[in-house]
Amino acid sequence: MRSGLASVIDNHGQTPLLNEVARELGALSARLTHVERLTERTLYVACAAYVYARAAAPARVDDTQLSDDITAAFQRQLSHAGDAS
C-alpha cells in the first residue's frame, strides 16, 4: 500500500489532498491493527472461560493441561475464522 501511495504521489506531485489521504490511511491501519489485537484477546479469553468451565465439571486437571486446552480451543476458533497461523 505504501509503495502504491508513493507512486501516486510521485506521478502527480505532492498535493495536500494526497498527503491527507496517506495520513488517514496510516491512522486507519493503526486502528485496524489495534482492533485485531483486541479481537484476538477477546477470543482467547472466551476460549479460556470455556476450558475452565469444562474443567470444573469433572475432576480438576492440572494447569498445564488447562493451558494446552485453552491454546487448542483458541487455535480451533482462529481456524474456523479462517485466520489460523
Image (cartoon, grey):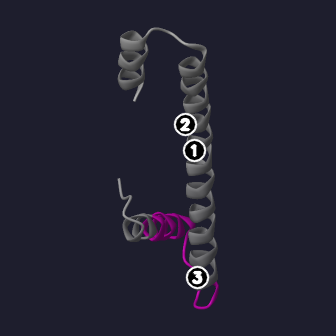
Side of 70 where 46 appears, left or right: right
Which region shows up in magenta? 56-74
Q: Amino acid at mark 1?
A: Leu
Q: Amino acid at mark 3?
A: Ala
The total number of labels drawn is 3
Tell me the CA gap for discs 1 and 3.
34 Å
Question: Residue under circle 2?
Answer: 29
The vertical placement of 73 against 3, above or below, is below
Q: SS at mark 2? A: helix
- For the point 52% across and 64% down, the residue is 67
- For the point 57% across and 66% down, the residue is 63
- x%, y% of residue 68? 46, 65
Please name which of the two marks, 2 or 3, marks the residue nearer to the observer: 2
Please name which of the two marks, 1 or 3, marks the residue nearer to the observer: 1
* Residue 32 - label: 1
Q: SS at mark 1? A: helix
The residue closer to the viewer here, 1 or 42, is 1
Tell me the CA gap for discs 2 and 1.
5 Å
Q: Are marks 2 and 1 in contact (CB under 8 Å)?
A: yes
Q: Specify the quadrant of the image occupied by residue 24.
A: top right
- x%, y% of residue 85? 35, 53
Question: Residue under circle 3?
Answer: 55
- x%, y% of residue 30? 59, 35
Q: Amino acid at mark 2?
A: Ser
- x%, y% of residue 25? 55, 32
The residue closer to the viewer here, 50 or 16, is 16
The vertical placement of 45 against 27, above or below, is below
Is residue 63 on the magenta stretch? yes
Going from N to C along the chain, the mark reached first, 1 or 3, is: 1
